[in-house]
Amino acid sequence: MVEVEHWNTLRLKIYLGENDRFEGKPLYKAIVEKLREMGIAGATVYRGIYGFGKKSRVHSTDVMRLSTDLPVVVEVVDRGYKVERAINEIKPMIKDGMITVEPVIVVWVGTSEEISKFEDDAVREL
């Protein structure tokens, strides 16, 4: 196994509503498809079970409050320049949401072949 550390990586989180749409499809799916098309290392979509947004309306999976617009978060971690490029592509797709960005240190662990695409600008340990 090989480890590669990236010290110039960012975590991007995009906060949306489950019912948000882009060109007829769920916005979170459209965003993930765009990120994949751009060659981002990976993306994960989280569906919230309880929360509220800027309008202070509570969204919940509770049967008594049956919400059909649960909170959704798309999370991405990649090198800084790729995250910055992704933000520029994704921002126009979002009508109502929030984007946060924070620095993170990433340690990729795997075979040499699996991590070879992350080697540029990395610190390597064998």
Image: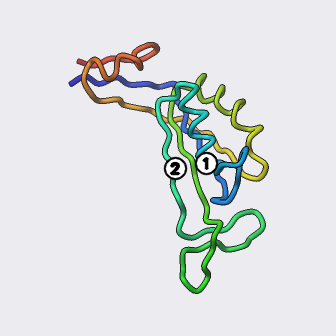
Who is closer to the viewer here, 40 or 103? Answer: 40
In the picture of the structure, the residue carrying the numbered disc 1 is: 28
Residue neighbourhood size for the residue with mark 2, other residues' Cα within 10 Å, grouped as few (<14), some (14–19), many (≥20): some
Residue neighbourhood size for the residue with mark 1, other residues' Cα within 10 Å, grouped as few (<14), some (14–19), many (≥20): many
Q: Is residue 27 above or below residue 38?
A: below
Q: Is residue 64 above or below residue 118?
A: below
What type is the residue that disc 2 sits on? Val
Residue 31 position within the rendered picture, expressed as x and y whole percent measured from the top left: 62, 40
What type is the residue that disc 1 sits on? Tyr
Q: Quadrant of the N terminus?
A: top left
Q: Residue furthest top?
A: 120
Q: Is residue 38 above or below residue 72?
A: above
Residue 69 position within the rendered picture, expressed as x and y whole percent measured from the top left: 65, 66
Q: Earlier in the sequence, mark 1 or mark 2?
A: 1
User: Quick one: SS at disc 1?
Assistant: helix
Q: Quadrant of residue 32?
A: top right
Who is closer to the viewer here, 72 or 104? Answer: 72
Q: Quadrant of the C terminus?
A: top left
Q: Quadrant of residue 29?
A: top right
Residue 67 position within the rendered picture, expressed as x and y whole percent measured from the top left: 63, 74
| Label 1, label 2: how far apart the Cα atoms are | 7 Å
In the picture of the structure, the residue carrying the numbered disc 2 is: 45
Which residue corresponds to the image point at 68% horizontal and 45% vertical from the top-left? 99
**126 sits left or right of 28 in the view:** left
**19 sits left or right of 63 in the view:** right
User: Quick one: SS at disc 2?
Assistant: strand
Q: Residue furthest front?
A: 24
